[in-house]
Image: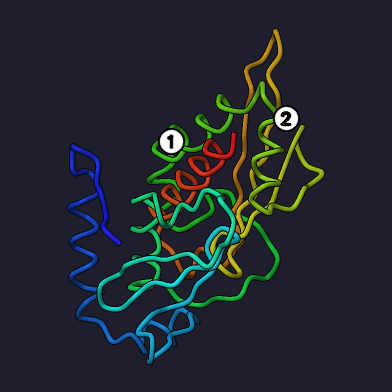
Amino acid sequence: MEITYDKDNKERVPFEHYLADYQKADPHELAMRTGTAYDDEKQSFRLKFIGRWYEVSFPEFSVSSESETEDYLPLVSMNAARILVIRFLLEGCAAGSTGKFLTYREVPWGEVYYRQFSGRCLSRLAFSYGNRLDQFCAALEKMGAKKLSQGDAGYEIEIFTGFWICFLIWAGDEEFPPSAQILFSDNFAAAFHAEDLVVACDVLIGTMKAQN
Protein backbone atom coordinates (compact mmCIF):
# COMPACT_ATOMS: atom_id res chain seq x y z
CA MET A 1 0.00 0.00 0.00
CA GLU A 2 1.43 3.36 -1.00
CA ILE A 3 2.05 5.83 1.81
CA THR A 4 1.25 9.49 1.17
CA TYR A 5 2.63 12.36 3.21
CA ASP A 6 1.80 15.94 4.06
CA LYS A 7 3.34 18.48 1.71
CA ASP A 8 5.61 19.85 4.43
CA ASN A 9 7.16 16.40 5.00
CA LYS A 10 6.70 16.66 8.79
CA GLU A 11 5.89 12.97 8.93
CA ARG A 12 7.77 11.64 5.90
CA VAL A 13 11.27 12.12 7.29
CA PRO A 14 10.58 10.52 10.72
CA PHE A 15 8.77 7.61 9.11
CA GLU A 16 11.61 6.96 6.66
CA HIS A 17 14.06 6.99 9.58
CA TYR A 18 12.04 4.40 11.51
CA LEU A 19 11.35 2.36 8.38
CA ALA A 20 15.08 1.98 7.75
CA ASP A 21 15.53 0.63 11.28
CA TYR A 22 12.47 -1.61 10.92
CA GLN A 23 13.81 -3.17 7.72
CA LYS A 24 17.10 -4.04 9.46
CA ALA A 25 15.41 -5.51 12.54
CA ASP A 26 14.77 -9.15 13.40
CA PRO A 27 10.97 -9.61 13.19
CA HIS A 28 11.05 -12.43 15.72
CA GLU A 29 12.78 -10.19 18.27
CA LEU A 30 10.18 -7.45 17.65
CA ALA A 31 7.37 -9.97 18.07
CA MET A 32 8.78 -11.46 21.28
CA ARG A 33 9.53 -8.11 22.92
CA THR A 34 6.20 -6.49 22.11
CA GLY A 35 3.97 -9.56 22.37
CA THR A 36 2.83 -9.07 18.78
CA ALA A 37 2.06 -12.14 16.66
CA TYR A 38 4.35 -12.67 13.64
CA ASP A 39 3.54 -15.05 10.80
CA ASP A 40 6.67 -16.38 9.05
CA GLU A 41 4.73 -17.61 6.04
CA LYS A 42 2.93 -14.32 5.44
CA GLN A 43 5.92 -12.28 6.66
CA SER A 44 3.60 -10.00 8.60
CA PHE A 45 2.67 -8.91 12.09
CA ARG A 46 -0.93 -9.10 13.28
CA LEU A 47 -1.89 -6.44 15.79
CA LYS A 48 -4.92 -4.73 17.26
CA PHE A 49 -4.98 -0.94 17.15
CA ILE A 50 -7.93 1.14 18.40
CA GLY A 51 -10.25 -1.84 18.30
CA ARG A 52 -9.43 -3.04 14.77
CA TRP A 53 -7.14 -5.85 13.62
CA TYR A 54 -4.42 -5.14 11.06
CA GLU A 55 -1.67 -6.99 9.25
CA VAL A 56 1.63 -5.14 8.88
CA SER A 57 4.09 -6.64 6.43
CA PHE A 58 7.79 -7.10 7.04
CA PRO A 59 10.07 -5.57 5.86
CA GLU A 60 7.91 -3.22 3.73
CA PHE A 61 5.53 -2.05 6.49
CA SER A 62 2.53 -2.11 4.18
CA VAL A 63 -0.73 -2.16 6.12
CA SER A 64 -3.99 -3.98 5.51
CA SER A 65 -7.10 -4.15 7.67
CA GLU A 66 -9.13 -7.21 8.58
CA SER A 67 -12.22 -5.04 9.05
CA GLU A 68 -15.10 -5.76 6.67
CA THR A 69 -16.88 -2.52 7.56
CA GLU A 70 -16.46 0.97 6.14
CA ASP A 71 -15.10 2.26 9.43
CA TYR A 72 -12.38 4.87 9.55
CA LEU A 73 -9.12 2.94 9.87
CA PRO A 74 -6.35 5.21 11.21
CA LEU A 75 -3.50 2.77 10.62
CA VAL A 76 -4.44 2.63 6.93
CA SER A 77 -4.96 6.35 6.41
CA MET A 78 -3.12 8.29 9.14
CA ASN A 79 0.65 8.69 8.97
CA ALA A 80 0.93 9.61 12.65
CA ALA A 81 -0.67 6.27 13.51
CA ARG A 82 1.89 4.44 11.35
CA ILE A 83 4.74 6.23 13.11
CA LEU A 84 3.28 5.33 16.51
CA VAL A 85 2.98 1.65 15.57
CA ILE A 86 6.41 1.36 13.98
CA ARG A 87 7.95 3.03 17.06
CA PHE A 88 6.12 0.57 19.30
CA LEU A 89 7.47 -2.38 17.33
CA LEU A 90 11.01 -0.98 17.36
CA GLU A 91 11.23 0.42 20.89
CA GLY A 92 8.21 -0.72 22.91
CA CYS A 93 7.58 -3.82 24.95
CA ALA A 94 4.76 -5.91 26.35
CA ALA A 95 3.97 -4.72 29.86
CA GLY A 96 1.22 -5.51 32.31
CA SER A 97 -0.85 -2.86 34.06
CA THR A 98 -1.66 -2.82 37.76
CA GLY A 99 -5.00 -1.20 36.96
CA LYS A 100 -3.78 2.22 38.06
CA PHE A 101 -4.01 5.23 35.74
CA LEU A 102 -1.49 8.07 35.52
CA THR A 103 -1.76 11.69 34.50
CA TYR A 104 0.67 12.85 31.83
CA ARG A 105 2.76 14.67 34.46
CA GLU A 106 3.25 11.34 36.29
CA VAL A 107 4.76 9.63 33.22
CA PRO A 108 8.59 9.79 33.00
CA TRP A 109 9.53 13.04 31.23
CA GLY A 110 5.88 14.07 31.17
CA GLU A 111 6.67 17.29 33.02
CA VAL A 112 9.17 18.22 30.30
CA TYR A 113 6.67 17.75 27.47
CA TYR A 114 3.58 18.87 29.38
CA ARG A 115 3.13 22.17 27.53
CA GLN A 116 3.08 20.34 24.20
CA PHE A 117 0.69 17.74 25.59
CA SER A 118 -1.60 20.36 27.08
CA GLY A 119 -1.94 22.27 23.82
CA ARG A 120 -2.10 19.39 21.37
CA CYS A 121 -4.22 17.06 23.47
CA LEU A 122 -5.99 18.50 26.52
CA SER A 123 -7.00 21.83 24.96
CA ARG A 124 -7.86 20.23 21.63
CA LEU A 125 -10.08 17.64 23.31
CA ALA A 126 -11.79 20.17 25.58
CA PHE A 127 -12.53 22.76 22.91
CA SER A 128 -13.47 20.20 20.26
CA TYR A 129 -16.02 18.42 22.44
CA GLY A 130 -16.65 20.45 25.61
CA ASN A 131 -19.87 21.82 24.15
CA ARG A 132 -20.64 18.77 22.03
CA LEU A 133 -20.81 15.95 24.53
CA ASP A 134 -23.25 14.01 22.35
CA GLN A 135 -20.69 13.87 19.53
CA PHE A 136 -17.92 13.00 22.00
CA CYS A 137 -19.94 10.04 23.30
CA ALA A 138 -21.08 8.90 19.86
CA ALA A 139 -17.55 8.91 18.43
CA LEU A 140 -15.99 6.97 21.29
CA GLU A 141 -18.81 4.44 21.45
CA LYS A 142 -18.38 3.84 17.72
CA MET A 143 -14.70 3.20 18.41
CA GLY A 144 -15.56 0.58 21.05
CA ALA A 145 -14.68 2.64 24.12
CA LYS A 146 -15.99 1.83 27.60
CA LYS A 147 -18.17 4.45 29.31
CA LEU A 148 -16.94 5.81 32.66
CA SER A 149 -18.68 7.65 35.47
CA GLN A 150 -16.04 10.40 35.81
CA GLY A 151 -16.49 13.87 34.36
CA ASP A 152 -19.55 15.12 32.54
CA ALA A 153 -18.61 12.44 30.02
CA GLY A 154 -15.79 9.93 30.16
CA TYR A 155 -14.56 6.90 28.25
CA GLU A 156 -11.73 4.38 28.45
CA ILE A 157 -10.33 3.10 25.16
CA GLU A 158 -7.71 0.46 24.35
CA ILE A 159 -5.22 1.80 21.80
CA PHE A 160 -2.80 -1.17 21.76
CA THR A 161 -3.64 -4.52 23.36
CA GLY A 162 -3.46 -3.98 27.12
CA PHE A 163 -2.78 -0.22 26.89
CA TRP A 164 -5.72 1.97 27.91
CA ILE A 165 -6.35 5.72 27.70
CA CYS A 166 -9.15 7.59 29.52
CA PHE A 167 -10.70 10.72 28.01
CA LEU A 168 -12.69 12.82 30.51
CA ILE A 169 -14.58 16.03 29.66
CA TRP A 170 -16.28 18.71 31.72
CA ALA A 171 -18.66 20.85 29.68
CA GLY A 172 -18.25 24.60 29.46
CA ASP A 173 -20.86 27.11 30.58
CA GLU A 174 -21.28 30.89 30.77
CA GLU A 175 -18.75 31.14 33.59
CA PHE A 176 -16.14 28.50 32.83
CA PRO A 177 -14.60 27.15 29.64
CA PRO A 178 -14.73 23.39 28.97
CA SER A 179 -11.91 21.30 30.39
CA ALA A 180 -10.50 17.83 29.85
CA GLN A 181 -8.27 15.26 31.50
CA ILE A 182 -6.46 12.36 29.87
CA LEU A 183 -5.18 9.40 31.88
CA PHE A 184 -2.94 6.50 30.85
CA SER A 185 -2.79 2.95 32.17
CA ASP A 186 0.42 2.68 34.18
CA ASN A 187 2.07 0.22 31.76
CA PHE A 188 2.54 3.08 29.25
CA ALA A 189 5.44 4.24 31.41
CA ALA A 190 7.33 0.99 30.71
CA ALA A 191 6.58 0.71 27.00
CA PHE A 192 6.43 4.22 25.52
CA HIS A 193 8.26 7.54 25.61
CA ALA A 194 6.40 10.63 26.78
CA GLU A 195 6.40 12.01 23.23
CA ASP A 196 4.60 8.87 22.02
CA LEU A 197 1.71 9.56 24.38
CA VAL A 198 1.17 12.93 22.70
CA VAL A 199 1.02 11.21 19.32
CA ALA A 200 -1.31 8.51 20.69
CA CYS A 201 -3.79 11.15 21.87
CA ASP A 202 -3.45 13.06 18.59
CA VAL A 203 -4.34 9.88 16.71
CA LEU A 204 -7.30 9.11 18.96
CA ILE A 205 -8.73 12.62 18.68
CA GLY A 206 -8.22 12.57 14.91
CA THR A 207 -10.04 9.24 14.75
CA MET A 208 -12.87 10.64 16.87
CA LYS A 209 -13.26 13.62 14.52
CA ALA A 210 -13.48 11.24 11.56
CA GLN A 211 -16.47 9.52 13.21
CA ASN A 212 -18.52 12.76 13.48
Q: Which residue is at the front of the view, 152 or 68?
A: 68
Q: Position of residue 164 (x, y in %)?
A: 62, 59
Cα distance between the residues tagged 1 and 2? 22 Å
Quadrant for the C terminus in the image: top right
* Circle 2 crowding by C-alpha within 10 Å: few under 14, some 14–19, many from 20: few
Marks 1/2 in contact by CB < 8 Å: the verdict is no
Q: Which residue is at the front of the view, 30 or 76?
A: 76
Q: Is residue 188 left or right of residue 2?
A: right
Q: Which residue is at the front of the view, 65 or 15?
A: 65
In the displayed structure, 12 sits above or below 161; it is above
Read off the residue under disc 2. 134
Q: How many marks?
A: 2
Quadrant for the N terminus in the image: bottom left
Mark 2 residue type: Asp
Single out the mark in the foreground, 1 or 2. 2
Location of residue 60 by image quarter: bottom left
Q: Position of residue 161 (x, y in %)?
A: 58, 69
Q: Position of residue 59 (x, y in %)?
A: 26, 77
The numbered disc on residue 145 is none
Location of residue 2 by image quarter: bottom left
Read off the residue under disc 1. 120
Mark 1 and mark 2 lie on one chain; the one further toward the N terminus is: 1
Q: Residue at x 64, y 43 (%)?
A: 167
Color encoding of the figure: rainbow
Q: Residue at x 63, y 50 (%)?
A: 143
Mark 1 residue type: Arg
Q: Which residue is at the front of the view, 116 or 148?
A: 148
Q: Position of residue 148 (x, y in %)?
A: 78, 47
* Circle 1 crowding by C-alpha within 10 Å: few under 14, some 14–19, many from 20: some
Q: Residue at x 59, y 44 (%)?
A: 182
Extreme top residue here? 174
